[in-house]
């Protein structure tokens, strides 16, 4: 049955703003995004919110609900007490355009900084031969809907804005891992992951994994395996020695 | 209110929310429990290393195994060896402490747990950390965490030694096989949990086949990787289970050795 819920919503442009209180009707089966839309329709016609699919597949409606990064369209009202005040704020790590809408261009810039898939020169498209098990691992990473909540929650940049130039964030470190694990990718990803994209900043505290709406095991399956690959290249004396000898005798 | 356009520098600012977190759940509970658990282990370990009653007939306390000094009684020595001569008079547990200790200290799971609960970096997700600067594992000393795989090699050996100790626990006080006491069961369970923890290690996963890109060309390594991946998915659970089992097993043996526990099926 319907009830009146208490909402506190961040309102303001360009980062300045405050939490505004609302009392708003909630009906059975609704999600937080529905309630935000009702606020727009009834009390705050200029309330800005980004959304698109309402099915948890476009990654547009990322916001913070009671302090946790969530998709507005996938957060059921039934998970809250009827008496609870629900606080809705924009993602903290990115600059605010208006109300709940943030400027996520940081993520697009980081995406561009990663060299794209680089196949060997002598293999033409159509000649790739891979088995399912060779690509299975990276298929998990392709479930990503680019909601950027992992980059938003990551304390490396959430709590330290100054790290942004040096750190690509879990979303794009995972992209590097995906390419590095690809059977036909020949670009160097290991040195650059560490030196240019800031893999070493990650202290594997797994918040990215905790918030991912696609339940991708970002830390266990992408970041830590990538860290191990970097160790091979940069920090493991035996592997380094082995490579030296092998390369020499291999001529 | 000013008009926001693409060129307006006001866009470059995040929401000026002045509180550390807006979370309303008990986010501090998990780090508090982790802190307590890890502290308990440290305190117990510190006591156990200096406690001398580590041999109870057929049982050897895990914290003192392998016992490598001449001061170890004959029955406690690994294959009867004592590579450290009689000049070594400190507690024998100190000799090997660094290997399992270093293994857990550099373990990817334990790193997560103590970065969160001891260093509060971050204490919980979307709760601001108290530090002004952050460089993660990019420089000394934390860059040393990258040697984890070497600890894994040693930990694998220690895991096998503890398994061997558990097998020896099927002998009675006079060395005859066929004994099964409560201590035997505790040591066997502990050995299984230690092995499950050790071989679920991320470095182990990398070594088996994680470093390869063509699984289909290495079917055996791929099989091993699949198995390690299963253990790895439960790495956190095995980390805690084996930490408590090793404490319980160690304490049990010492209590038997001290005569505090002396019921017939001990
Ligand atoms: S695991 Fe690493 S990348 Fe993911 S949130 Fe934590 S520090 Fe950031
Ligand atoms: S990895 Fe998960 S949390 Fe990160 S952008 Fe993709 S879907 Fe969102
Ligand atoms: S609106 Fe598309 S994910 Fe929520
Ligand atoms: S033992 Fe935990 S990751 Fe190696």
Image (spheres, rainbow, N blue to C red):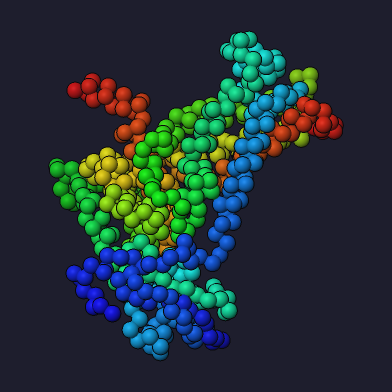
Q: Quadrant of residue B85?
A: top right
Place of residue A241 in the rendered image (x, y in percent of width and height, measured from the top left): 31, 24
Place of residue A57 in the rendered image (x, y in percent of width and height, measured from the top left): 36, 69
Q: Residue at x 82, y 28 (%)?
A: B259
Q: Quadrant of residue A58?
A: bottom left
Q: Residue at x 18, y 69 (%)?
A: B7
- In depth, the one of A159 and B78 nearer the eye is A159
Q: Residue at x 21, y 49 (%)?
A: A115
- In depth, the one of B98 and A121 nearer the eye is B98
Q: Residue at x 53, y 36 (%)?
A: B104
- In depth, the one of B262 and B234 nearer the eye is B262
Residue B190 appears left or right of A32: right
Residue A127 appears left or right of A46: left
Kindly tell me whether residue A216 is visible in this rendering: no
- The quadrant in which the N terminus of chain B is found is bottom left
Place of residue A235 in the rendered image (x, y in percent of width and height, measured from the top left): 35, 32
Place of residue A150 in the rendered image (x, y in percent of width and height, measured from the top left): 38, 58
Residue B170 appears left or right of A83: right
- Decide: is A77 above or below B168: below
- Decide: is B215 above or below B161: below
Kindly tell me whether residue A213 is visible in this rendering: yes
């Amino acid at each position: 049955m319907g009830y009146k819920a208490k909402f506190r919503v961040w309102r303001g442009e360009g980062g300045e703003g405050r939490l505004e209180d609302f009392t708003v009707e909630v009906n059975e089966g609704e999600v937080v995004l529905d309630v935000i839309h009702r606020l727009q329709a009834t009390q705050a016609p200029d309330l800005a919110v980004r959304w698109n699919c309402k099915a948890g597949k476009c990654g547009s409606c990322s916001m913070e609900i009671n302090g946790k990064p969530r998709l507005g369209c996938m957060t059921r009202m039934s998970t809250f007490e009827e008496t609870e005040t629900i606080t809705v704020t924009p993602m903290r790590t990115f600059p605010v355009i208006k109300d709940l809408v943030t400027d996520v261009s940081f993520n697009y810039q980081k995406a561009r900084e990663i060299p794209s898939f680089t196949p060997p020169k002598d293999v033409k498209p159509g000649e790739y031969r891979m088995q399912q098990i060779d690509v299975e691992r990276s298929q998990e990473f392709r479930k990503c809907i680019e909601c950027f909540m992992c980059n938003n929650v990551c304390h490396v940049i959430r709590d330290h804005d100054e790290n942004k130039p040096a750190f690509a964030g879990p979303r794009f470190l995972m992209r590097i891992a995906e390419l590095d694990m690809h059977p036909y990718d020949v670009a160097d990803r290991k040195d650059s992951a560490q030196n240019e994209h800031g893999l070493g900043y990650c202290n594997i505290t797994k918040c990215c994994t905790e918030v991912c709406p696609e339940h991708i095991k970002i830390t266990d399956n992408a970041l830590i395996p990538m860290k191990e690959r970097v160790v091979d290249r940069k920090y493991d004396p035996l592997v380094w020695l082995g490579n030296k000898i092998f390369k020499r005798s291999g001529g | 209110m000013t008009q926001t356009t693409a060129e307006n520098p006001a866009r470059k600012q995040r929401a000026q929310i002045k509180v550390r977190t807006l979370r309303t759940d008990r986010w501090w509970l998990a780090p508090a429990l982790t802190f307590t658990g890890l502290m308990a282990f440290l305190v117990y370990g510190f006591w156990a290393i200096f406690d001398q009653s580590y041999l109870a007939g057929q049982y050897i306390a895990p914290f003192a195994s392998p016992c490598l000094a001449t001061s170890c009684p004959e029955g406690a020595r690994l294959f009867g060896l004592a590579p450290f001569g009689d000049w070594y008079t400190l507690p024998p547990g100190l000799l090997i402490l660094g290997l399992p200790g270093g293994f857990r200290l550099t373990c990817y799971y334990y790193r997560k747990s103590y970065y969160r609960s001891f260093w509060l970096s971050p204490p919980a997700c979307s709760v601001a950390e108290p530090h002004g600067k952050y460089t993660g594992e990019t420089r000394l000393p934390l860059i040393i965490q990258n040697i984890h795989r070497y600890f894994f090699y040693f930990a694998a050996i220690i895991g096998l030694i503890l398994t061997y100790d558990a097998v020896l626990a099927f002998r009675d006080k006079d060395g005859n096989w066929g004994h099964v006491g409560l201590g035997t069961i505790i040591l066997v369970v502990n050995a299984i949990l230690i092995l499950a923890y050790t071989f679920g290690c991320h470095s182990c996963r990398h070594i088996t086949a994680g470093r390869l890109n063509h699984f289909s060309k290495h079917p055996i390594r791929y099989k091993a990787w699949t198995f390690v991946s299963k253990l790895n998915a439960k790495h956190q659970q095995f980390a805690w289970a084996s930490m408590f089992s090793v404490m319980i097993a160690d304490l049990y043996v010492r209590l038997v050795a001290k005569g505090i526990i002396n019921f017939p099926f001990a």
